[in-house]
Image (tube, rainbow, N blue to C red):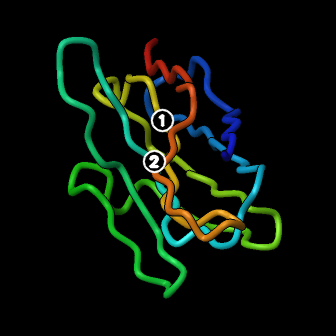
Amino acid sequence: QVQLVESGGGLVQPGGSLELSCTVSGSIFTLNVMGWYRQVPGTERELVARANTGGEIRYADSVKGRFRISRDNAMNTVYLQMNSLKPEDTAVYYCNTVGYGADFRPFDSWGQGIQVTVSS
């Protein structure tokens, strides 16, 4: 119903910065929530940050003050600016959106995931 395309991952040194972006396309009526999760092999996927259409933003404690989520609603895009990166931020990052399609059916969709590696 909707497709999510992520970009911006890669390898960065500790203390560096990266910006992830995720654009949603398809049959969209509304994107109520857009956010980012991450997963390390052998562990559960965890919330990094999410933002809803009402302006409410939630961050994981581990990224507060270092990461910033933002939305461009006109472009159906969500960004994750990651600063002061640490080796423990290394993970596959997944974009997620919850909303309604043009047929008013709800969806909860994920991107394919993008690798972020923080290493010297």
Q: Residue at x 77, y 50 (%)?
A: 26
Question: Is the N terminus in the top left, top right, bottom left or bottom right quadrant?
Answer: top right
The image quarter in which residue 8 lies? top right
- The amino acid on which the numbered mark 1 sits, given as a three-letter code, is Tyr
Left or right, residue 14 beside residue 30: left
- The amino acid on which the numbered mark 2 sits, given as a three-letter code, is Trp
Q: Residue at x 49, y 84 (%)?
A: 55
Query: Foreground: 102 or 72?
Result: 102
Query: Foreground: 63 or 72?
Result: 72
SS at mark 2 in the image: strand
Q: Are marks 2 and 1 in contact (CB under 8 Å)?
A: yes
Give the percent coordinates (x, y) of residue 35.
47, 55
Give the percent coordinates (x, y) of residue 109.
51, 45
Query: Foreground: 77 or 120?
Result: 77
Number of numbered discs on residues: 2
Give the number of the disc on residue 17.
Answer: none
* Residue topped by disc 2: 36
Q: Residue at x 50, y 62 (%)?
A: 106
* Residue topped by disc 1: 94
Relative to 38, is 65 above or below? below
Give the percent coordinates (x, y) of residue 107.
50, 55
Point out the residue furthest to the right here. 75
Relative to 34, is 25 above or below? above
SS at mark 1 in the image: strand
The image quarter in which residue 103 lies? bottom right
Q: Residue at x 27, y 33 (%)?
A: 45
Marks 2 and 1, how far apart at CA: 6 Å
Q: Earlier in the sequence, mark 2 or mark 1?
A: 2
Point out the residue furthest to the bottom here. 54
